[in-house]
């Protein structure tokens, strides 16, 4: 019998990974137009747009996996604790996973792949140590189990480095500290075959429903696109609409029929008459879209 509900976790993944992809792309186009246009590139604008969305989804995959791991541990009786904490110096630290079962504390620093360069791996381990110091100083527990966890067990680039640094920490802390990959986390936590039967099973089924390429024709569903992007800052749209090359090169790819832009024009027009403090900016955007024929 499955512990996790496929549809529930699928919705978590889809929401965390794919939601706001269009708004994110519009924002990046406004802030960094040169990344998408210009002659000194080996890729076309269309290819660059697809690449950007795909890369964004890859980064957010780790966020979806954090939810999956959290819900799985909760099924085994763990209680999730507050993830964002303030240090004495005012800085904020954010835990990937922090849970408690009875009076046993579980801390997991979770990443997708162990493939970082030397600078980033040192930064990650320093971050892990700061969090460990915080827990020892501020949390009450009978036992503390800490993990540096990489989901993908096929990449272990810095395994020797992490193993060596963990050995140094073990002489200082009264804590179980381990480096684990893939299913090793659940073996350490005596959770049976959940890696294969729950996690791998979910991923295989979820991936079958993924499209071959992300959709970059935002006019296929103009209402959906409009609702996702309409409340972006008017300054973002001002930069976009003042860039002739973006309008000429990128807009025909993202908005081939212009249906989304027409919805935006009507929205900007209504906002220009409201008491919104950006009313003047919305009026300018409305006039610009009219000038462009929308």
Image: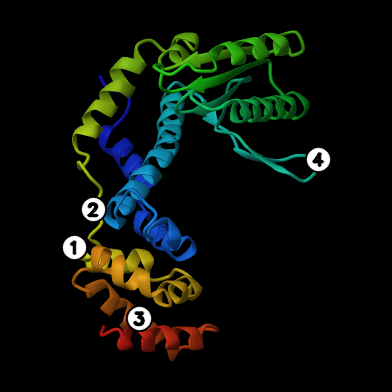
SS state under label 4: loop
Disc 4 or 3, which lies upstream in sequence?
Answer: 4
Q: What residue sits right under mark 3 in the picture?
A: 267
Cα separation, mark 2 vs mark 4, equals 46 Å
Cα separation, mark 4 vs mark 3, equals 46 Å
Q: Which mark is residue 88?
A: 4
Q: Is residue 156 above or below residue 86?
A: above
Q: Nearer the viewer, residue 61 or 145?
A: 61
Q: Which mark is residue 215?
A: 2
Q: Please tell me how crowded label 1 is: few (under 14), some (14-19), or many (20+) other residues with Cα within 10 Å.
A: some
SS state under label 3: helix
Which residue: 49% across, 9% down? 188
Nearer mark to the viewer, of 2 and 4 = 2
Q: Quadrant of residue 39?
A: bottom left
Q: Position of residue 268 (x, y in %)?
A: 38, 82
Q: What residue sits right under mark 1 in the picture?
A: 220
């Amino acid at each position: 019998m499955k512990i996790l509900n496929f549809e529930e976790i699928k919705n978590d993944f889809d929401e965390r990974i794919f939601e706001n992809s269009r708004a994110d792309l519009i924002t990046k186009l406004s802030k960094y137009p040169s990344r998408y246009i210009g002659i000194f590139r080996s890729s076309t604008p269309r290819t660059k747009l697809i690449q950007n969305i795909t890369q964004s989804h890859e980064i957010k995959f780790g966020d979806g996996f954090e939810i999956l791991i959290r819900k799985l541990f909760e099924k085994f009786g763990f209680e999730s604790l507050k993830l964002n904490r303030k240090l004495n110096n005012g800085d904020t630290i954010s835990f990937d996973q922090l849970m408690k079962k009875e009076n046993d504390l579980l801390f997991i620093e979770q990443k997708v792949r162990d493939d970082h360069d030397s600078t980033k791996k040192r930064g990650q381990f320093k971050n892990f140590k700061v969090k460990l110091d915080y827990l020892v100083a501020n949390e009450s527990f009978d036992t503390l189990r800490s993990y540096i966890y990489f989901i993908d067990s096929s990449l272990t680039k810095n395994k020797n480095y992490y193993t060596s640094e963990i050995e140094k920490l073990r002489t200082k802390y009264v804590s179980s500290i381990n480096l684990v990959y893939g299913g090793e986390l659940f073996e350490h936590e005596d959770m049976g075959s959940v890696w294969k039967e729950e996690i791998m099973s979910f991923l295989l089924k979820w991936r079958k429903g993924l499209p071959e390429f992300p959709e970059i024709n935002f006019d296929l569903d103009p209402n959906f696109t409009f609702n996702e992007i309409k409340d972006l800052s008017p300054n973002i749209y001002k930069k976009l609409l003042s860039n002739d090359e973006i309008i000429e090169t990128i807009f025909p790819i993202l908005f081939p029929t212009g249906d989304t832009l027409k919805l935006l024009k009507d929205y900007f027009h209504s906002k220009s008459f409201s008491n919104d403090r950006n009313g003047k900016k919305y009026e300018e955007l409305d006039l610009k879209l009219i000038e462009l024929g929308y």
